[in-house]
Amino acid sequence: LPSHYVLPSGDQIPAVALGCWRSARDDVGEAVKTALKAGYRHIDGAWIYGNEGEVGQALKYSGVPRREVWLTSKLWNAHKTPEDVEPALNDTLSKLGTDYLDLYLIHWPVAKKDGQPYDKTLTADPYPTWQKLEEMVAKGKVRNIGVSNFNIPKLDNLIANPLKIKPAVNQVELNFWLPQPELLEYAKRNSILLEAYSPLGSEGKVKETLALPEVQAIAHEMGMTRAQVIISWHIQRGTVVLPKSVTPARVVENLQVRALPPALFDKLEAAARAHPPSRGLNPSTNWLDYDMFA
Ligand code: A2P
């Protein structure tokens, strides 16, 4: 399996990251330290996760040089007005204890001003925010930029603009229940790397994923754990994978992956596509009165 992917900038992004969403502040530091010790060199976080300070402390404590670790963060929905972007980025940088990010993503394709409801006009056009992100690259505060939770129409809408820098990645929910083959195909065609969040199926569905007969059979045949089978499948699909865990043994386990033989990969891929897709996370009903995924 590839240990890295190469982005259009030439930077190499490690294929497996420690995901920090839903990691409690009290736990995330230990998880980061365990991960770095186990060989992870990619930490995926976001301002809204509320734990960037703890992640930064753990990085410092680990003694691993900053340039050896890939750090991703995400611009929150309430910080997307161009004048709000740089202060938001500065806050993330200071919490993480660094002067640059390897990757900065627009967290969701929706926008609002702080303390106000979601704003359809701000949401409709991501280009002003994107131009500000391009400026952050020019200033050296960010090495690569991308998006998160964008579907095909939203990506089309963004890349129709005269971009100086194209989105390098799109981080989305990808798992057995939501394999998104069309988006994967589109991303490959447009040289956008997908990153899989909730790769095991998100909190509520992890048990169900690991209990799948296909997964159990492959794990048995390969002498791998069931989580390792799923994580390997993601990398073989050509995406970055972001398993979240705060359990040390699982953090270590999730990095130890290897390729499935094509026949077993195909079996898992077919099973993932054989049922109606279902989303673990759909905040659109809370955030806007229209479907943000449409
Ligand atoms: P925990 O953090 O308590 O170890 P996803 O990344 O798809 O959202 O899945 C995260 C969930 O899966 C968390 O509840 C995490 O639990 C659990 N998890 C992570 N790695 C493993 C693993 N190797 N085996 C079983 N469960 C895991």
Image (cartoon, rainbow, N blue to C red):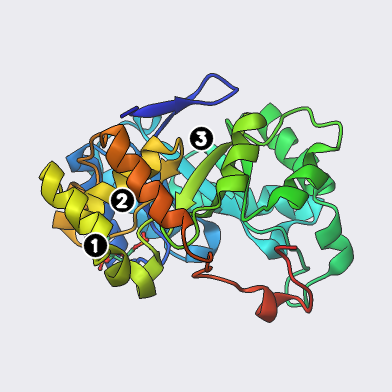
Secondary structure of residue under mark 1: helix
How far apart are the alpha carbons under marks 3 and 2?
Answer: 26 Å
Q: Nearer the viewer, mark 3 or mark 2?
A: 2
Residue 49 is situated, as x and y percent measured from the top left of the image, at: 48, 64
Q: Residue 230 carries which label?
A: 2
The quadrant in which the C terminus is found is: bottom right
Q: Which residue is drawn at 23% across and 48% down?
A: 228
Specify whether residue 33 is in view.
no
Q: How far apart are marks 1 and 3 (CA)?
A: 38 Å
Residue 205 circle label: none
> On screen, 116 above or below 5?
below
Closer to the eye: label 2 or 1 = 1
Asked if the beta carbon under badge 1 is closer than 8 A to the nearest atom of ligand 1, the reply is no
Q: Where is residue 175 in the image (x, y as percent from the top left)?
A: 43, 56
Measured from the top left, where is residue 85 in percent x and y? Answer: 71, 51
Nearest the viewer among 176 and 13 is: 176
Q: What residue type is labelled 2?
A: Ile
Circle on res. 102: 3
Instruction: Indicate left or right for 294 with 188 as reference.
Output: right
- Of the four image quadrants, the one with ligand 1 is bottom left
| Residue drawn at 33 percent across, 52 percent down | 57
Q: How many marks?
A: 3
Amino acid type for the residue under numbered disc 3 = Asp
